[in-house]
Amino acid sequence: MPEIAKINLLTYNEKISSRNEESKGKFRPLKSREIKILKKNRNFSHNWEKIFVADNFCPDLIHNSKFHGSVFIGKQEKLFLEYHDLKAPVGIFNSTIISCSIGDNVSIENAFYIENYNIGKETIIKNVDEMLCSEYPKFGNGFLFPNEDEEARIRVELGNENGNRSIIAHTKLNSIDAYLWYKYKANSSFQKKLEEITDKEFSERTSPYGKVGSHSVIKNTRSIKNVLIGKHSYIKGANKLKNLTIKSSKDAASQIGEGVELVNGIIGYGCRIFYGVKAVRFIMRDFSQLKYGARLINSFLGENSTISCCEVLNSLIFPFHEQHHNNSFLIAATVKGQSNMAAGATIGSNHNSRGADGEILAERGFWPALCSSFKHFSKFSSFCITAKGQYPYELNILLPFSLISNNESENCLQVMPAYWFLYNMYAMARNPSKFKNRDKRIKKDVNIEFDYLAPDSINEIFKALTLLEKWTAKAYSLESLKQGKTILRSNITIENEILADELENSERPKKIVKIKEGYNAYRQMVKLYSVTTILKFCEAERKEICVAIEENFSTELGSWVNAGGQLFLEKDINNLIEKVNSNQISTWKEIHNFYKECDKRYEKEKLKHAIASLVKLLEISNTDQLMKEFPSLLKEVKAINTDISEKTIESKIKDYNNDFRMITFDNEEERNAVLGKIDENSFIIEIKEKEKELNQMIDNFIHSL
């Protein structure tokens, strides 16, 4: 049992007195008449001289409460505060207040113990067992106080259960910071600098008082310790909140609900955490949600993400992740956003080495199917979807936009390249607008790339094209990639089995299906991306195509990195690391400004990448050759755009033409009432408008050439 210390309340003084000195100019001591009224209302203090109040203080509004240490109370008016169905009278009732500052028109009732808290104006605190702030609070930050041992540092162990990818949580940390800190572990100097920057910026600025922001509501909650609570927060029925920062504002109010237990975390603006959630050592970015018994431990959850019911441990998750089902879990994984975990999908904890040190890495758009499981170590390119199945071997899926299947009847792995473009264009085309519409962030400090065709995925397509050529050449016992390329671009029907040993760590066959269709779809997507990027840039900058191409001509694709949802050239990341290591950048603000500068150049760099993509795809070497090809490219991309629009609509129409989609409806009218009419589908209408706009743009540029 811990030993209980003794404090003499008659001589009780706050350990930190700076607030007291600052506040005394705004408050006055109690008048003797006010003390009499307070005593009459069954209030108690060992020293009434330590109670300071505003001019509009009303002692009639304080009943049956105890005060210790210096307490500051703002103005009080005889009115009720109302939040939804809750009405709470201004005043302090049946509560114990120790060394606190209480703002104007606050309602505190049945708060059995509040110590060292600054409470903002027009706030409701009702039925709280304890709310206190200790001598050295960190509020979820992982810095160390002077003379504090390194073992006391709180780290968030991302991406690997062995803890060697851990980062230090802090309130300024965004998705990009988390990724760079987690990823570049081999650069020990960079790692050390990030720790030094964090310790310097946060340990000197941390207040020794907890905070409840103005216009907040806290009710029916058991324990709050060392928590900074932002304005307009709503906390209802929580069990335990300890060592947290809860960001909140009027336009992005955060809410915490029944049965929640949160320890050592940073909670972003506009977050929702409800119904039995447990989270320990975690970071939640703005407008993310935890619901229905979800468990989030040693993990980072990106913006606009939702996790319900399931278990997530030691994971780094980029923005726009969805995981809704009780029987799924995600452990020791890095999922780069725009992802969806289906029911029964189990990723992690199938340790296949001598320790808990496996990893899963999935680029953006990862979609594992119902009841699918994977073996560490595995890696997935962008926008991969898996069919239902238990995948018994490590995977290295190098083909983006592919469908992966575990064919148990033939004991082989099957991969269909460019599946989304061939068979589910509706879902793929809907993604960019879906994510943009769901982006609720007020402050967009990470510029998330929503388009499925972008420098990261296009670079993956080029690698995939080379691999498909290589595997085709091998299947026909040819000696060069060029010969494989010739077959894939010809009218020859591919009858030989195409095998790809690189995709799985096993002796069984790894088959590529519909290789020619996938190969051609990849090439079409590169043309679509490149031409539309050039046209949109020219339209925005009011430049002629030939001028834009000549000024930005490039033959280098560059290496691109999805860091936290924002795309960077790898050379820019290396430049940042060098600047941090050499102390040219020495604060988190400067690091974030570097990201912004990269973002300002993004459209220009994307244009160069689009030009380089055409140069590589068409196998040309100068601007004259590219401009010679451009008129025909415009016509081809117009046809591709129309084809994509038709495929998008066609993939949705399948739902209406499927007889089994009618069996629960008595007639077409009932189906339309429930599912809506196909020609009234908002996204179908949007797709048609986008097709028309892009085709019109292409026509305009064709006439200008």
Image: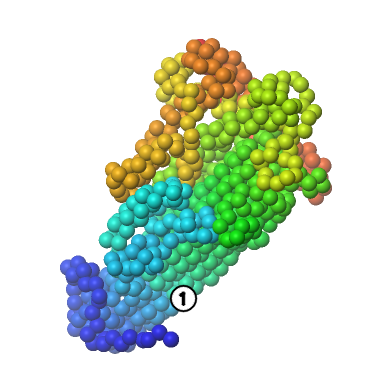
Residue plotted at (66% across, 61% down): 327
Q: Nearer the viewer, residue 536 or 144?
A: 144
Residue at the location (73% across, 45% down)? 507
138 left or right of 468? left
The quadrant in which residue 428 appears is top right
Q: Position of residue 584 (x, y in %)?
A: 28, 43
Q: Nearer the viewer, residue 4 or 408?
A: 408
Q: Residue at x 55, y 39 (%)?
A: 433
Whether 61 is drawn above or below 201: the answer is: below
Q: Quadrant of the N terminus?
A: bottom left
171 up-or-down from 70: above or below: above
Amino acid type indicated by mark 1: Arg
Q: Is residue 424 visible?
A: no
Compared across the picture, whether 60 is left or right of 405 comes to left
Please give the count of numbered marks on the rendered protein. 1
Query: Quarter of the image holding residue 326?
Result: bottom right
* Local secondary structure at mark 1: strand
Q: Which residue is mark 1?
A: 222
- Image height check: is 114 above or below 352? below
Residue 603 is situated, as x and y percent measured from the top left of the image, at 44, 31
Q: Residue furthest left?
A: 25
Q: How busy is the neighbourhood of tag 1: few (under 14 within 10 Å), some, or many (20 plus)?
A: some
- Expressed as whole percent of the image width and height from the top left, the position of residue 396 reads 63, 43
Q: Is residue 336 visible?
A: yes
Residue placed most toward the observer, 325 or 594: 594
Q: Is residue 589 left or right of 224 when viewed as pictured?
A: left
Residue drawn 41% across and 58% down?
169
The x, y position of residue 207, in whole percent, is 29, 65
Colour mode of the rendering: rainbow
